[in-house]
Amino acid sequence: MDNTVYLGLWTNWSRGAIFGVTLTTTKSYGNLLISFTAVFIALVTTRLWRILCLLLHRCYSTGEPRGAVHHQRQVVLRNSASPEAGLFDIVRLGWAWRSSGPRRIIGLLPLLLFAFIYLVGFTVVGGFSSSISTAVSDEVLVRSTTCDILGRFAAEKSNNAANYGQQCYNTSSSGSDRSRTSACNIFIRGNLPTAVINYASDCPFEQKICRDARSTIYLDSGYIDSHNDLGSNAPESARIAVRYRCSLITSNTFNGTIFPFTPISELARPDGDLTLIFLSGNRVRFAQKMDDSWYRATQPYSGAYYPGGPLRDWCNKAYPKEAGCGPLASQGDAIYGAAPLFNLTNEDLEPSRPSPSSAPGARLTWFWVSMLQHPTTVRAVLTFSGVKSLASQTRFRDGIQFALPENQWQLDVINWWNIILAGVQASCILAVDAAQGFSDPEFLSIRTPPLTNEAQRFCNNQKIRSSAHTSFSFFGLAFTFIVGALIIAASYSIEPVLVCLHNRKKYKTYSHLEWISNGNLQLHRLAHEESGETTWQNCDEEIPVTTAFDDSLARLDITNPSHPTLQRPTKQEVANNTQEDTHNTSDEERINSFENPDGSSDAATNVSTVTPQLEPEIEDASHFISPSLFTTVRSA
């Protein structure tokens, strides 16, 4: 099945033309994309925080005298690289000033609350980044080059439907949510719900034919939507709905001709199919007396009459609700009655392979013909599954029928009903059938391919569920990465834009220079500039530098460990530092930098010329050449 899953972009019409654009990939690539999206959101969170810090810094900026808390808050806003770092610094700042009273630190509360909400909010957003996939769930599109209807394997399909009905429809199945078990996680819905189950309905025939209130049951599937329920991916205007309704009674009364079957007048129903079902004991022994309406242990057999195969009506969803539905009738009357709603004529529905020219008609006929190949009627269920379709078989062993509830015949009917619904679900997965070996040449004679483009599109737009693939909302991915990329670009470009505005328009000079000066390296410059004679340049840029490369900066004075300060170096310390820097220059590097008198570089010549004079003057190989030797070399 996995090799028929379409990988790439497709439209999931459950979410609309825009939000429904879906990207399907393999599970491994999907996990990588989810991980990358989470990392990307984390980066966007950090860059957006920097933008907000800049805006808040400029908002708080003022040239008027303010206290230490104000200026420390400005420094925190300027230098916090991430929301968690900023929140931590604000908390520490408030804790440090806790003894000064609430008036000093109350100005930190709005920023503290903002940082907390921001951090929590984007942590949640990052955690839900996988919802770009889970929101679409595990729905995938299946396509096949051999999307055909097969005229055989009816018994196999009936058995598959019976097994699926037992696992995914049976209320006694284990698990709180049967639709999520692996066996029931194939179709777009785990099972089709039944809208109405009435165990004591009105008699669908003349009243005298029904034994009592316990001898009737009424089932109504409600409208089964080809898209929402069966996974046939299509917009609202191209969808089909079908509704199944049936009533069943038990009775010991039967008169009429079996071959051909001509029911008595009390059983005649012109608006539906009539199926007569007999239950024969075949020497089955009952472990105890049975008072069930159908499983009477004292009776050799009894009959059950089932009007409708079942009754059904077809609807064109392009019309308003129920306005586009045909009559509730038998299998043949229902499809012929609904034909005009799909731009079909009776000739288009002849037994010979129909090929209507209209798109709605092509969809209806393909849907109808595909359902005919699956157990979607009681007759088909009983024909191919026989006694195995009875729910009572779970309590039958070695020719003995063990205790059954008094409404066992109704449980049998519900089991048939579930098999029918499972068959309806399977009838749309033709692409999957074709992918499972039915493209063998020996099946060419029984394959019925789509004859129109619309039928081909209908067949190749089937949704199923797959745990081996991951589907993403392409709109969600595009929105996340486009907006995230814009935020990242803005975070790196907003400061250069403000620098340009300041340089050209002198726009908010104080706010701009305060932002620059509150940077880590500029604060470092300000501290050393006040404690030494070093001169600096680039003082209005991000990174300041000293005018002289070998300037000595103040050192940390830890005479008082609880109050370290910067101490200006003495002249002797500066001289010693300069001399050490000179001696730490490599001899080879200095010599190789010399030039010949003609301006060219000749490292080999310089080395050979200098070496005889260098040896007597170097006492320590780690020291460099002296200034007098430098003059000698240059004159050479």
Image (spheres, rainbow, N blue to C red):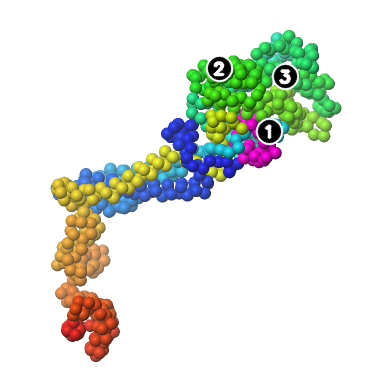
Secondary-structure class at tag 1: helix
Q: Residue at x 49, y 46 (%)?
A: 30
Q: Is residue 383 above or below residue 4?
A: above
Residue 371 visible from this viewpoint: yes
Q: Which residue is mark 1?
A: 446
Please tell me which residue lies in front, 337 or 315.
337
Q: Check disc 3: other Cα within 10 Å, few if <14, some if 14-19, many if 20+.
A: some
Q: Is residue 617 magenta?
A: no
Label 3 amino acid?
Thr
Nearest to viewer (mark 2 / mark 3) = 2
Pointer 3 residue: 275
Q: Amino acid at mark 1?
A: Ile
Q: Is residue 444 magenta?
A: yes
Instruction: Please name which of the two marks, 2 or 1, marks the residue nearer to the observer.
Output: 1
Q: Is residue 191 left or right of residue 262?
A: left
Q: Quadrant of the C terminus?
A: bottom left
Please indicate, yes or no, whether residue 179 appears anywhere in the rendered image: no
x, y (%) of residue 407? Answer: 72, 23
Taking the spot 20% from the left edge, 71% from the top edge, the residue there is 550
**Circle nearer the viewer, 1 or 3:** 1
- Mark 1–mark 3 distance (CA, rounded to whole Å): 28 Å
Residue in front for this viewpoint, 606 or 110:
606
Could you tell me residue 434's position as x and y percent?
63, 38
Quote the CA–CA distance across marks 2 and 3: 28 Å
Left or right for 66, reference 266? left
Please state the extent of the stretch shown in magenta in the rendering: 421-448
**On the picture, is 39 further left or further right than 155?**
left
Question: Callout 2 environment at 10 Å: few (<14), some (14 to 19), or many (20+)?
Answer: some
Which of pointers 2 and 1 lies earlier in the amino acid sequence?
A: 2
**Quadrant of residue 226 within the rendered picture:** top right
Q: Nearer the viewer, residue 18 or 72?
A: 18
| Res. 549 image quadrant | bottom left
